[in-house]
Amino acid sequence: MVLWKQQQTALEMQRNEKRLYLQALYENLINKVITQTEYKELRKDYQSAIENLLSEITCLEEIQQNVCQKIENILNLQENFRATQISEITKEFVDKFIERVEVSPDNTVTVTFYFDELLKEIGGEQHCVIM
């Protein structure tokens, strides 16, 4: 979470820097340091960069919310698991905690719990494509 916050802060700083450049660009136009054509071209580039940075920031926020929700789900499952007295495997237990049971040809049994996938998702990388 700290890494995402640092990355988000860095992106926001870049965005603010681009905004300052955009403001300075306008001042250069007013002071006739650059032409109207140069101003329009550079303004378009800066605005595009600002929009891309905003998209990246939004994406990071969405990923962070997604991961927080998954952590909350795991904690809820963990709490339910601890609260359940297990003396035998009941239908209620299976419905609550077991996603899939597989028996291979060599009679090996693999049990997949619901929280297994949540743990994999949190441990795996999250990607965001910025266009």
Image (cartoon, rainbow, N blue to C red):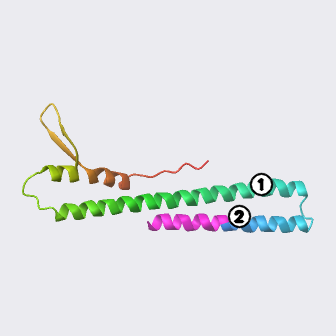
Quadrant in the rendering for residue 73: bottom left
On screen, residue 93 versus residue 75, left or right, reads left
In depth, the one of 102 and 90 nearer the eye is: 90
The residue that label 1 is drawn on is 44
Q: Residue at x 74, y 68 (%)?
A: 20
Looking at the image, the residue that sits furthest to the left is: 87
Quadrant in the rendering for residue 83: bottom left
Disc 1 to disc 2: CB gap under 8 Å: no
Residue 106, percent across and down? 13, 32
- The vertical placement of 104 against 130, above or below, is above
Residue 77, percent across and down? 26, 60
Mark 1 is on which residue type?
Answer: Lys
Residue 89, percent across and down? 11, 51
Label 1 residue SS = helix
In depth, the one of 77 and 14 nearer the eye is: 77
The residue that label 2 is drawn on is 18
Looking at the image, the residue that sits furthest to the top is: 105
Mark 2 is on which residue type?
Answer: Lys
- The vertical placement of 6 against 91, above or below, is below
Magenta segment: does it hold 2?
Answer: yes
On screen, residue 120 versus residue 16, left or right, reads left
The count of marks equals: 2
Residue 54, percent across and down? 62, 59
Question: What type of secondary structure mainly makes up the magenta span?
Answer: helix
Magenta segment: does it hold 96?
Answer: no
Q: Which residue is drawn at 56% across and 68% down?
A: 9
Q: Nearer the viewer, mark 1 or mark 2?
A: 1
Magenta-drawn segment? 1-15
